[in-house]
Image: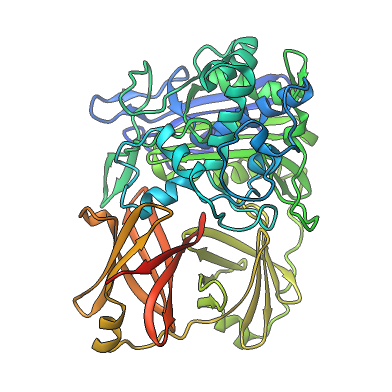
Amino acid sequence: MTDVDAALATLFSDWAPDEPGGVAAVLHGDRVVARRAFGLASLEHAIPNTLSGRFHIASVTKTFVGAALAMLAHQGRLDLDADARAIIPELAVPGPITLRRLAGMTAGLRDAMEMMKLRGVWYRYPRSEADLTALALAQTEPSYPAGERYVYTNIQFNLCALAIARTVGKPFSAAVDELIFTPLGMTRTLIRDDPETMTDGLANPYIKDAGGWRRGAWAFGVSGAGGLVSDLDDLIRWNLALRDGSVNGVPIVAMTERGTLADGTPTNYGLGLGIRTWRGLTVWVHGGSLPGYKANFARVPERDLGFVLLSNREDADPYARLRRLLELTLGESVPAPPVPDTGLDAATLKALDGTFVDANSGEPLTLTRTESGLTGDKLGFALSLAPQGKGVFRDGWANADTIVRVESGPRLHVDFGGQRGVYLPANPPTLTDADRAAYAGRYVCPALATEHTVFERDGGLVVRFGPAYHEEAELPLAPLAADTFHGKTGRPGWVSQHVLRFTRAGGVVAGYRISSDRLKDIAFVRVV
């Protein structure tokens, strides 16, 4: 390997010392070969980040949930492949749903955080873990059948945490402490599931906005989905435990086994751990994101290399920095493979710049050509699609493996983690005053115990989530196709996108189904 300390300095050279930053460490074998702290933990008081500082690790929490499940399964205390109702009988969605499907992101459940948004409850408005869990358990329909596709959702890990707690007979925080934290000496790691809990040494979260910085805010209790706070030393201990494959003698290697869809297609996720490849090398990895906090936790087992990044700035881009670190440290020994030709003519390539719509789901995919391939946006899910030859592009680093096959037209065949569809160029209709008036009205959703209002404003349409008014809960709508609309709302740090497909009865608008990246086809019925 090259000089790792110099590589870390290069990797974070764009972070000014008077801005938020973070901490990072690189491991080789059983040793820490480099560690650094960057920037400020508090802009208000000019307090620097230190190697002992704490950060929210967000979804890196899921690695501990996956490990705890693997340990309990090895001990025979739970069965990953039995129906989860053996432990969580309140689960109302029909059909078998196993803990392995929950921890592998293939259970198909509606994401509770997304459902809260549809109620008009944004992430800055307090809702406890119990609130989220109760909403999820009350659902009688899934987003999609279990095993049909991989969709990254948080509620599945809230339920896994509940299963762990009930199996151990203690609250989740105490259970994971007993199973993992205490045996590994992780004394600085704890659940912080509300913004009011005092936590010493915790860096403040920051989001860049309009050239300045503002505080990140999050008030949902996310528990096993992302509620842990930790520091660099504790996550180094955790990285070494993953290297060893066990905690206190109990194996956790089941985390690193790829899941599969019902049709046998492998996913790029194990039990709470992403499984990617970089230039032919396996990378075990999980990122984390809350407004103003970013994290990355990774191992490259073939090179016995580990990486930990904890940051208190929204633009940290931890996955991109991990790949850049691998280039800086391993690039000379693992050269980049040649990039295949796209296999497409110039006219077809040019036509790929733009928005495409799936005729079945109504979901848009916006593509932009780059020197190395395509970038994409699918309801806020960012894609970097590399050419594979013969008109095929692939992103194997996103949460869901994504393959786009281009036919003339252009016509796109998209496989997004098992969500498959044919996308055609968007051809949005021009709406008249009568068209907009036809959509306006009040719509209710018994499953969410909420209502929406669609109304005209400044020559366009807006849908307001929930009965209470606040600006963040308004979604301006832009037409994509007949009776199909796309909307984007939010603020830096947490932007939401949705697609609405209106339904008709006797030619009259009768309701709609609304979807986001992590929630599919919630039905609303028109009442006025």
Q: Is residue 107 left or right of residue 388?
A: left
Above or below, 426 relative to 308: below
Can residue 5 be spotted in the picture? no
Looking at the rendered image, the quarter that the N terminus falls into is top right
Which of the colour schemes (rainbow, by chain, secondary structure, one colour) is used? rainbow
| Residue drawn at x 52%, y 58% as measured from the top left | 382
Q: Residue visible at 73% across and 22% down?
A: 77
Is 72 situated above or below 96? Answer: above
Left or right of 284 on screen, residue 9:
left
Q: Position of residue 300 (x, y in %)?
A: 72, 36
State the residue in front, 341 or 241: 241
Quarter of the image for residue 500 reads: bottom left
Please determine whether, in this image, residue 103 is positioned above or below residue 51: below
Does residue 134 lie above or below 462 as drawn?
above
Percent x, y of residue 292: 38, 39
Q: How many discs appear?
A: 0
Which of 480 and 9 lies nearest the eye of the viewer? Answer: 480
Q: Quadrant of residue 508?
A: bottom left
In which quadrant of the rendered image does the C terminus lie? bottom left
Residue 282 visible to an observer of this rendering? yes
Report whether 140 appears left or right of 475: right
Residue 509 is situated, as x and y percent measured from the top left of the image, at 37, 80
Q: Position of residue 47 (x, y in %)?
A: 31, 22
